[in-house]
Image (cartoon, grey):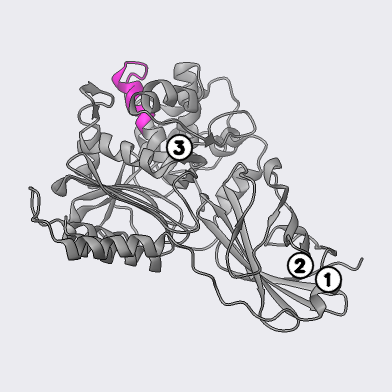
């Protein structure tokens, strides 16, 4: 692989808010980079790429005879539950329909953009499995592709029924164990079922192991973990995702397929990607804080392949790649504005907010003294995220706090004018970053920022 081409790919990753980039070719790690302030020692949330792991566990259960076939009706696994809106269409849903996102459930997840309404409603539900099973049917199963994170969650519950273990435990024994993967976290629903649609965190290097397993048709170190035809079915699928942003996208077993490029990939929100390029014998992993153009990334990778044997040594090209890696792995200080007099007046003061789409309940910033920091209370059902505090850089560089369930909080801030403080925060390893504008006026704080789906929101603090 050409070092100059790889340097361009690394630089492109910076424009796409990458956290990491890793390439494996012919079984060797060719490139492994981490974009500051993210670092190699922090696991990364893979979001909806979790679905591909759940699908892999179904494949393993099928190979091992725990599952009798992909045509097994789904409702038979839930005979112990009363289920609403049952009709002949719902009775006909199979395991394969769940794997291929053709279950036919009525669902709204903002696949083409917008709010992820059904996903949010499921997260607020006291019983996620019941929420999905009770959904009315919009189509007969097998007829229409529609992206639905409820489908893999049902499969996670089915894995537990087949094995007597959570998907997380079954994975440790049958998938992660053989691959040498140690998980850091896998979120669970209120009943303790491993979240099927997202919620798994892995190191990028471990993500690459999953891709390598698929590149080698389910075989790892001489042992067949997946059915031999499992990866082939993905590579040759004709099931269209009906995506207006790319008519060539196909789908199978929770993998996205770039059919015209002969590339398939596990995909998570904000470009958490395990990409397999069989024609190039390449596995690529990306983690990021924003969306990325899959086809363009695949082209960058393919274009960097020059031959099937070792290239002549080109020291200038090697040096160029090394400089690019050093550049992206070194955090650069952002511009810092002058500190106004109001800073001391508002430092340490707690501002409370009514319920809002930014989910901030209260905020306190400590802007004086030798250790600037913040304290934040959130509107959330996730107990580990209800209160967050940590250091905050006022010199243009992030300061990292204590690791929490979903990553490592890192924060910095600066004054854009005499009344507005810009507060930047990342959860390193979560693929999420936020920027809030704190405007102080006569004892009140106006908080502005963007929601997860890109809407601009502004909310004023309540009177103390």
Dot placed on the residue nearer the N-terminal end, 1 or 2: 1
Residue under label 3, please give it.
152
Query: How many angstroms separate mark 3 from mark 1 (CA)?
Result: 47 Å
Instruction: Please identify, in this view, whether the residue under mark 1 or under mark 2 is nearer the observer.
Output: 2
Tell me residue 372's x, y (percent).
73, 62
Q: Nearer the viewer, residue 320 or 174?
A: 320
Residue bounds of the magenta highlight: 56-68
In the displayed structure image, the side of residue 273 where residue 148 appears, left or right: right
Residue under label 1, please give it.
346
Q: Residue at x 64, y 46 (%)?
A: 402
Q: Are marks 2 and 3 in contact (CB under 8 Å)?
A: no
For disc 1, the neighbor class at 10 Å (few under 14, some 14 to 19, many from 20) is: some
Instruction: Please identify, in this view, whether the residue under mark 2 or under mark 3 is nearer the observer.
Output: 2
Tell me residue 108's x, y (percent).
51, 53
Tell me residue 319's x, y (percent).
24, 63
Q: Which residue is drawn at 46% across and 53% down?
A: 269
Residue under label 2, please give it.
367
Tell me if residue 60 is in the magenta stretch.
yes
Query: How many angstroms separate mark 1 from mark 2 (CA)?
Result: 8 Å
Does residue 148 appear anywhere in the picture?
Answer: no
Name the chief secondary structure element in magenta. helix
Dot placed on the residue nearer the N-terminal end, 2 or 3: 3
Q: Residue at x 50, y 36 (%)?
A: 153
Secondary element at tag 2 = loop
């Amino acid at each position: 692989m050409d070092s100059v081409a790889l340097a361009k790919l690394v630089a492109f990753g910076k424009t796409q808010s990458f956290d990491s980039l890793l390439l494996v070719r012919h079984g060797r790690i060719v490139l492994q980079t981490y974009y500051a302030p993210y670092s190699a020692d922090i696991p990364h949330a893979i979001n909806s790429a979790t679905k591909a792991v759940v699908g892999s566990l179904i494949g393993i259960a099928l190979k091992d005879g725990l599952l009798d076939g992909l045509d097994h009706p789904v409702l038979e696994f839930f005979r112990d539950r009363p289920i609403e809106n049952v009709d002949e269409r719902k009775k006909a849903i199979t395991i394969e329909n769940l794997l291929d996102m053709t279950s036919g459930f009525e669902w709204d997840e903002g696949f083409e953009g917008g709010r992820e309404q059904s996903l949010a409603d499921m997260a607020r539900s006291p019983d996620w499995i019941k929420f999905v099973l009770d959904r009315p049917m919009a189509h007969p199963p097998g007829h229409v592709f529609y992206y639905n994170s409820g489908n893999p969650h049902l499969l996670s519950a089915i894995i537990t029924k087949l094995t007597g273990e959570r998907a997380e435990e079954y994975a440790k024994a049958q998938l992660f164990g053989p691959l040498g993967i140690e998980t850091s976290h896998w979120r669970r629903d209120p009943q303790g079922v491993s979240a099927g649609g997202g919620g798994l965190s892995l190191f990028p290097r471990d993500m690459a192991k999953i891709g390598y397993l698929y590149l080698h048709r389910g075989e790892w170190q001489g042992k067949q973990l997946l059915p031999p035809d499992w990866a082939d079915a993905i590579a040759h699928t004709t099931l269209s995702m009906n995506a207006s942003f790319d008519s060539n996208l196909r789908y199978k077993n929770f993998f996205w397929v770039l059919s015209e490029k002969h590339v398939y990939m596990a995909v998570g929100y904000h470009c958490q990607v395990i990409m397999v390029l069989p024609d190039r014998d390449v596995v690529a992993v990306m983690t990021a804080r924003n969306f990325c153009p899959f086809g363009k990334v695949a082209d960058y990778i393919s274009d960097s392949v020059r031959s099937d044997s070792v290239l002549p040594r080109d020291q200038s090209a090697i040096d160029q790649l090394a400089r690019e890696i050093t550049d992206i792995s070194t955090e650069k200080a952002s511009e810092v504005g002058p500190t106004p007099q109001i800073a001391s007046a508002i430092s340490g003061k707690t501002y409370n907010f009514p319920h809002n789409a930014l989910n901030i309940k209260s905020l306190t910033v400590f802007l004086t003294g030798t250790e600037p920091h913040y304290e934040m209370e959130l509107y959330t059902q996730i107990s580990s995220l209800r209160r967050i505090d940590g250091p905050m850089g006022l010199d243009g560089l992030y300061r990292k706090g204590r690791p929490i369930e979903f990553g490592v909080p890192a924060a910095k801030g600066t004054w854009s004018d005499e009344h507005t403080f810009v507060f930047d925060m990342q959860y390193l390893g979560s693929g999420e970053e936020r920027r809030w504008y704190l405007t102080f006026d006569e004892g009140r704080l106006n908080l502005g920022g963007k929601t997860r789906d890109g809407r601009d929101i502004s909310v004023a603090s309540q009177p103390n």
